[in-house]
Structures are given as structure tokens and as C-alpha cells.
Amino acid sequence: MTTSRLARIEEAAALVALEIEAARVYLALEGYHWVNEAPPMAVEEVERAIAEDGVWVVERHKQVVGAAVCLWHEDDCHLRELNVHPQHARRGLGRGLVDAVIDGARRRGCSRVVLTTFSHVPFNGPWYERLGFSVLRHPTGWLAEERAEEARIGLDRRRRQAMAKRLR
């Protein structure tokens, strides 16, 4: 049985561990092994997102196997992290989490859900396009700052893209 719900504060460290585990899928992709070595979100950042009702988890048999971490910017929902444990991948859990994020963002009155992702990784950019997200060619405001921060820490802008799904 699979259920989704908002995360609890005591789950923050486990969600960081889930992010680390989910990153292992990049080991199989040529040129992306370094993603597995990149530092995960800080526990304190996940705790803040949980406190602001910005983290959804999916459970299978009472075990958290997926999570979506969102940050709120003005009237945007920033889908900061989406992770599914590799043993539970390709079962629709990621899509269910994105649906939960969209529902939560609508309830909060957001105009769009925004993310940054790898443009050519099949389970990143192309997958989000299938879910109705569009590429943002010229991000502005907080999203432009996010993209600049990604470049500053070494993420190749040619491999990354910003995407959004309009909610209204």
C-alpha cells in the first residue's frame, strides 16, 4: 500500500539520507557520477521546509521511500528536491509526489511550480516535460539567483535548465 502525506520534523535526517541514496542512480550515467558525490541538502534546510509545510513523502508499507522538498518564493513553489529510493523507482511514486506538490502549491495560492534540473537526463528534464513543465529560457528574480548559485558551485549551465508549470 502506498500513501503520501506531509513530512514530520523528526524525519528530516532520514530525508537527507534518502537524497543520498537516490543520487546513486547517477553512477550509471556517463558524465554524471559526480552528482552522487555532491553534498545533499542540509538537515536544517529540510527542517525549515517541513515547518513551512513544504515537504511531502510517499510511504510503501509504512517506510518512507520518496520525498519532495519545496521552498516558497513569493507566489512560486520551488520544487528543490525530488527523490525516490532506487529500489522503488519506476512505479509512479515520483509522479505522485509531483501531483502532491502541485495540489499543495495550488492550495497555497502559488501561480507556478518551478524547478531546475538536468536537461538531457531522461528521468529529469524530459520526464518533467511529460508532466507539463516547460523550459524557462530567461529566469528572473529568485530563480536567476538560484541558477547563478548553481553555476557558482560548478553545475554546468549547458546541462541544466529551469522549468515551470503554470497553475493559474
Image (spheres, grey):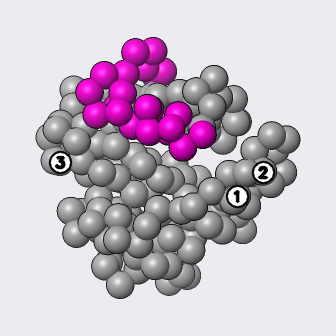
Label 3 crowd (10 A; few <14 / some 14-19 / many >=20): few
Disc 2 marks a residue whose amino acid type is: His
Q: Give SS at disc 1.
A: helix
In what element is the residue under mark 2?
Answer: helix
Quadrant where the image shows the C terminus: top left
In percent of width and height, residue 136 lies at 43, 20
Q: Nearer the viewer, residue 107 or 52?
A: 52
Name the foreground residue: 2 vs 86.
86
Q: Which residue is mark 3?
A: 107
Nearer the camera: disc 3 or disc 1: 1
Disc 1 residue type (three-letter): Asn
Spatial CA span between label 2 and label 1: 6 Å
Which residue is drawn at the image coordinates 29% and 62% (left, top)? 49
- Answer whether labels 2 and 1 touch (C-beta < 8 Å): yes
Whether residue 167 appears in this view of the structure is no
> Residue at (35%, 33%) from the top-left corner?
145
Against 8, residue 52 (above or below) is above
| Disc sitting over residue 57 in the figure | none
Question: What label does residue 36 carry, if any?
Answer: 1
Q: Report the residue marked by disc 2.
A: 33
Residue 122, image x, y percentages:
70, 36
Residue 11 is covered by the magenta coloring: no
Q: Which residues are magenta?
A: 126-154
In the rendered structure, are the residues bearing label 3 and label 1 in contact, judged by CB atoms less than 8 Å apart?
A: no
Residue 30 visible (yes or no): yes
Image side of residue 119 versus residue 48, left or right: right
Q: Do labels 2 and 3 touch, CB within 8 Å?
A: no
**Residue drawn 31% across and 27% down?**
166
The furthest residue to the front: 152
